[in-house]
Image (cartoon, grey):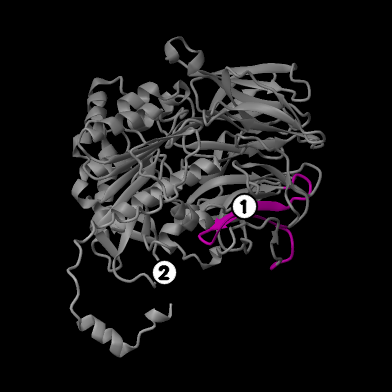
Amino acid sequence: MRRLALTVPTLLFVACAALPPAPPPLPAAAPAAPAAEAVVVPNPNLVLQDIPPIPAALAQQVARYTDFRGHGFLEWHPTRREMLVTHRKAGGSTTQLFRVTAPMAEPEALTDFSEPVRVASWEPQRGEYLVFERSNGGDEADQVYRLDVADRQVTLLTDPTERHEIQGWLHKSSQLLVGSVPLDRTAQGGSREKIRQTLTLIDPANPGQRRKLAELPGTGWGVGGVSWDDRRVALTRYISATESQLWLLDLRNGKTRQLLPAPGSKRKASFLAAGFKRDNSGIWLVTDRHGEFRQLALYDLGRRRLLPVSRHVAWDVDQIGASRDGRLLAAQVNVDGRSEVRLFDARSRKERPAPALPPGGVRALGFHPQAGELAFSLDSAKGPGEVWSLDPNAAKGAAPVQWTRALAAPGVDPQAFGDQQIVRWKSFDGRGISGLLSLPPERFGGKRPVLIDIHGGPEGQAEVGFMGRYNHFVEDLGIAIVQPNVRGSSGYGKTFLALDNGMKREDSVKDIGALLDWIATQPRLDASRVVVSGGSYGGYMSLAVAATYPQRIAGAIDVVGISNFVTFLRNTESYRRDLRRVEYGDERDPAMRAFLERISPLTNASRITRPLLVVQGRNDPRVPYTEAEQIVEKVRANGTPVWYLRAENEGHGFRRKENADFQFYVTTLFLQQTLLK
């Protein structure tokens, strides 16, 4: 080795000396192949078409946004100061039932199924068992079960060939009211022209003991309260978002009679029953009979008079809870997309001072049957649902009591998330439209790309609340999110609610065109980088915007959306069909059928030229999967890139965490490729 230890002068000498001719160069070596990038393998229930591999690094980057776990209030225990709530446990896939035995106590799991459980009720006398609803694979063919809390034994109470709903209990005995409708899978030809809804009284402790109370024509019937003497049932017949009726069922003989509107009246309105007055002299309800908004009111059965209670509140009352002693009412009021609690004295029908609540929107409420304590769920832009309670009769300034704490993945502080702001713009006809805007943090400079996310319904509403996984788009990717409340949305009066009905359907699409105009005027928003997204009816809106304004968007996302109104109405479950015909139009009418065909995205698919992501559940009873597959095929014929994700074990939206996570990965990659390149 010492002979190589040459001094610098020697090296210079050697370099200058005469050398033999150099050999010909060797062929250049091929560059080393990069290591294969790790990717996320979808679970066996997911079907992917033309979706690029999802980098494992992407899944790791967004993982902290996929494990928010809040709680939703369902019901107080009938005798103890404890609650029944919904929650997803750590590592769990679906929402299940839990009980919380004291404020901030560790929730105790009552169910642990592969299918989600979101609806349940305690047996009202002693609370020794509860009943719950559960479907299979997202098919919404709900069955009712009894769960014996002591040993977790589960007993099926209903006929699997039909769809069932828990409708309430009698007061003096543990007998359960169940509403049922037939399913198309048991119909000849897979469809039914006529549907009847059955109301049955079941003793869950002895399931063989049951009595059919009534067969009701059509669908949309729901129990709105049982009289305190167990003799009568208030029924709501829901016809559309702007029309419903109040009926009375006599439990002794099964006879029904219409109360509101009076039989023969041509004046339509919304009447939604919410329980009997404690002395059985009247029925509490919410109605828009006296104005634009749904008000709390009392129908006096003896005088046959409707008495307004909250006429001074110029917003919709969405929910009512009554204390068991009949003295107090709690109303959930939707104030411009923010849900508040208002209290009313049930005897004087006067409003009481509102309690001071923690920040957030109220999602559910209920009085304890014995103590009168009021429980409620809250969420906000800064966190998922938490459950609280308050004593309405406590001294002024008494603080609410927190019962549950929402959970987030390590490294995520939801309190740092930005608040949503309400924004407004003028549409094509001068009408004011509003929505919610979530802006990225100030560290993101320049004009920011925009995701327009449209709610379903169509009579839904974008409300102030927690955005869950979508916080990643705002906080980490710097994407602004606008959630518009186009005409036809609830919460802004019955006139606004009806502005998209029938032949006016395209006017709501024009509201998004006006939103695109507004985005172009905003200093922090980039009108050249916009993706439109939506679920269910919002999926239709996304497709319609993609066909109407193809040059003004960068891409579109359709989640369980309607692509053709005629095929949708033909294939949706029969128990939903007539309710949807009132909203969208009756395809059996030739003029309406021609209109629906003309405006459907499938008809206009040749105009969808921007990248499209379509997400669908195979078992969806509302918007059948065929709506997704026909638009995928038609748009691909344009040469337009279409990503298609279908889950074989889901229905109208993904409910299992593993599926929802993968949908989020795909959506994130789609936004990166359409908005951030």
Q: Nearer the viewer, residue 133 or 372?
A: 133
User: Where are the magenta residues, as a range?
Assistant: 368-397
Res 142 visible: yes
Amino acid type at circle 1 is Ser
Q: Which of marks 2 and 1 is in front?
A: 2
Residue most toward the bottom?
9
At mark 1, the secondary structure is strand
Residue 8, x across and y down, in percent = 31, 88
Is 177 in front, or is 27?
Answer: 27
Image quarter (top left, top right, bottom left or bottom right) of the C terminus? bottom left
Direction from residue 249 to residue 459 in the image, left or right: left
Q: Is residue 99 above or below residue 465?
A: above
User: Residue 633 appears in which quarter of the rendering?
Assistant: top left
Give the answer, above or below, for where 36 lies relative to 581: below
Quadrant of the drawing holding the N terminus: bottom left
Q: Which amino acid does label 2 sit on?
A: Pro
Residue highlighted by disc 2: 441
Residue at 17 percent across and 68 percent down: it is: 21
Question: CA–CA distance between discs 2 and 1?
Answer: 28 Å
- Residue 607 lies, in percent from the top left, at 19, 39
The residue lying toward the viewer, choosing from 297 and 201, is 201
Would you say residue 260 is visible in this rendering? Answer: no
| For residue 559, above or below residue 212 | below
Is 113 magenta? The answer is no
Point 27% across, 60% down: residue: 519
Tag on residue 377? Answer: 1
Q: How crowded is mark 2: few (under 14 residues within 10 Å), some or many (20 or more)?
A: some
Other residues around mark 1 within 10 Å, as few (<14) / some (14–19) / many (≥20): many
Answer with mark 2 or mark 1, whichever residue precedes in sequence.
1
Q: Are marks 2 and 1 in contact (CB under 8 Å)?
A: no
Image-based side of 221 in relation to 84, left or right: left
